[in-house]
Image (spheres, rainbow, N blue to C red):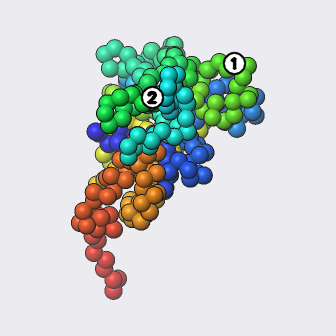
Amino acid sequence: METVERIAEVVLYEGFLLYPYTRSTMKNQQRWTFGGVYPREYSEASGGDDPWLMQTQCLVSGNAQTEVAVKVRFLHVVDRKVAEHAGGEPCFVDELRVGDEVHRPWEEAIEREIVVDGVPGGVTMADLTIENRTVEIDVPEGSDQEPVLDPSGSRVGSIIREWSALRGRVEMRAESAGADLFRFTVRITNTTPLDTTWEGSGRDGIVRRSLISTHTILRVRNGDFVSLLEPPPEHAAEAARCENVKTWPVLVGDHGERDTILSSPIILYDYPQIAPESHGNFFDTTEIDELMALSVLTLTDDEKREMRETDPRSREILERTESLSPEELMSLHGSIRSLQTLRREE
């Protein structure tokens, strides 16, 4: 997985679950707090605190034939229900025990991706200065069922996953910002219609109709992006005019490369990196891996059991952390990246 995809994966699941990674913890009952793009009707009715649009605006250095391509990624919240098959019709339950396994209701997520590009590799600046390019977001509601079997192979229950429809659009446009310079804009909007019951559905009902952890990957060919954090002097004024709404665009890749931008709800610096010592995501980039790993290892047996039962991703964190060798744990303590000789002035 290339650098931008690895960092985008971290952004996508930031705050998905927080330590101690259990469903009963209060902070894991109020989730989906990053990068939300909510239904417009709800956003406007609630005063706009929960935005219905996200906008990335940046500068592209190039010419009329410079090409851009955009990928929008987000999480779609899924309602996981558990049904017990006992004596006929399935019945929804708060807990289903089968041997050593316990199944409980929860909110999971599906990764969604919208790609806006052209043929063969992108849309040109010439195209976008003449006409906006729009791709509709159209995800129908749906569901699936996973059978729960007892040790003998008999079906004793079902895990039912349901998701709501999503509607919206991704729009790209460009305008000249000077000689061989363009202002490039990507707008993501949520126009999901709401029925008459949405006011009584609470926040849970709204987030299931929202784009969560939304972020955008922008690529350019035969041109370069301009850093908005440290623009060259000749582009500083135009960089300051860029309007970004609920997102923060930075250059990604090897230091000095300027062909890719990651625009996310998380404030990053240009060329963010994932430490090579990291063994996986803890969904909380404000903490260091060593602290999170040691904290997981100190959980009680009951807490580990609940962590294992909460979500496949929390189970993966537990299994990954418990499998770390002493040498791997020690490597998380700290690393020297470079040394510099300091000389005292005479």
Q: Earlier in the sequence, mark 1 or mark 2?
A: 2
Q: In the rendered view, tell whether residue 67 sits above or below residue 313.
A: above
In the image, is 208 to the left or to the right of 256?
right
**Res 148 visible:** yes
**Res 175 visible:** no
Task: Give the CA distance from mark 1 to mark 2.
Answer: 28 Å
Mark seen at residue 162: none
For the point 48% across and 36% down, the residue is: 108
Q: Which residue is mark 1?
A: 195
For the point 39% across and 25% down, the residue is: 69
On the image, the x and y values in percent for residue 309 come to 43, 46
- Name the amino acid, label 1: Asp
Instruction: Give the quarter of the figure containing the N terminus.
Output: top left
Q: In the rendered view, tell whether residue 14 sits above or below residue 47.
A: below
| Secondary structure found at label 2 | strand
On the image, the x and y values in percent for residue 109 come to 47, 34
Q: Which residue is mark 2?
A: 158
On the image, the x and y values in percent for residue 148 come to 40, 31
